[in-house]
């Protein structure tokens, strides 16, 4: 009888240990899932921030390059205008003289 009681007590203790192990495993699994979810959320946030920083940096670089090209273009136009001014004035004078010398 005593042996049967000991076996039943051992079985009850084993069942309790298995139940406790299952509970601990479920708790650990949930904790791991939560940790993974937090890490994923953090990584996604960092990814979004990195994309925003890269996009802003690209936008600034593009704007700076566009501004530089516009200034360069204006300088070239002004230089061309200065080089052509004398020729334009000379041509205008030639046309005016030719019109004045037309027979009436």
Image (spheres, helix red, strand yellow):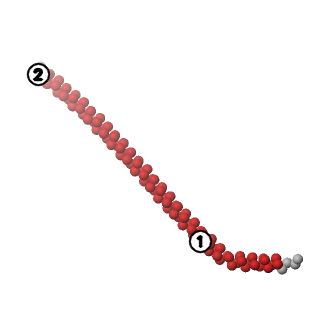
Whether pointer 1 and pointer 2 mark residues with C-beta atoms closer than 8 Å, the reply is no
Question: In the orientation shown, which residue stands out farthest toward the left?
Answer: 2
* Residue 53 x/y as whole percent: 44, 55
* Residue 46 x/y as whole percent: 40, 50
Q: Could you tell me which secondary element the residue under label 2 belongs to?
A: helix
Direction from residue 10 to residue 51 in the image, left or right: right
Occupied quadrant, residue 13 = top left
Mark carried by residue 88:
none
Occupied quadrant, residue 99 = bottom right
Q: Which residue is tagged 1?
A: 75
* Residue 102 x/y as whole percent: 85, 78
Q: Nearer the viewer, mark 1 or mark 2?
A: 1
Direction from residue 76 to residue 21 in the image, left or right: left
Q: In the image, is residue 7 above or below residue 82?
A: above
Looking at the rendering, in which quadrant would you find the N terminus?
A: top left
Q: Which residue is tagged 2?
A: 2
Crowding near pointer 1: few (<14 within 10 Å), some, many (20+)? Answer: few
Q: CA distance from mark 1 to mark 2?
A: 107 Å
Occupied quadrant, residue 96 = bottom right
Q: In the image, is residue 68 above or below residue 102?
A: above
Direction from residue 64 to residue 37 in the image, left or right: left
Residue drawn where x is 34% and y is 40% of the image? 33
**Considering depth in this image, is 43 or 15 the residue closer to the camera?**
43
Residue drawn where x is 71% and y is 77% of the image? 89
Direction from residue 55 to residue 72 in the image, left or right: right
Residue drawn where x is 88% and y is 77% of the image? 104
- Choose the circle earlier in sequence order: 1 or 2: 2
């Amino acid at each position: 009888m005593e042996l049967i009681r000991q076996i039943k007590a051992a079985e009850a203790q084993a069942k309790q240990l298995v139940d406790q192990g299952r509970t601990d495993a479920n708790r650990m699994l949930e904790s791991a899932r939560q940790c993974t979810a937090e890490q994923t959320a953090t990584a996604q946030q960092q990814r979004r921030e990195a994309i925003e920083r890269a996009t802003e940096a690209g936008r600034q670089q593009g704007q700076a390059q566009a501004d530089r090209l516009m200034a360069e273009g204006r300088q070239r136009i002004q230089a061309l205008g200065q080089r052509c001014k004398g020729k334009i004035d000379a041509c205008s004078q030639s046309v005016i003289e030719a019109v004045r010398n037309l027979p009436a």
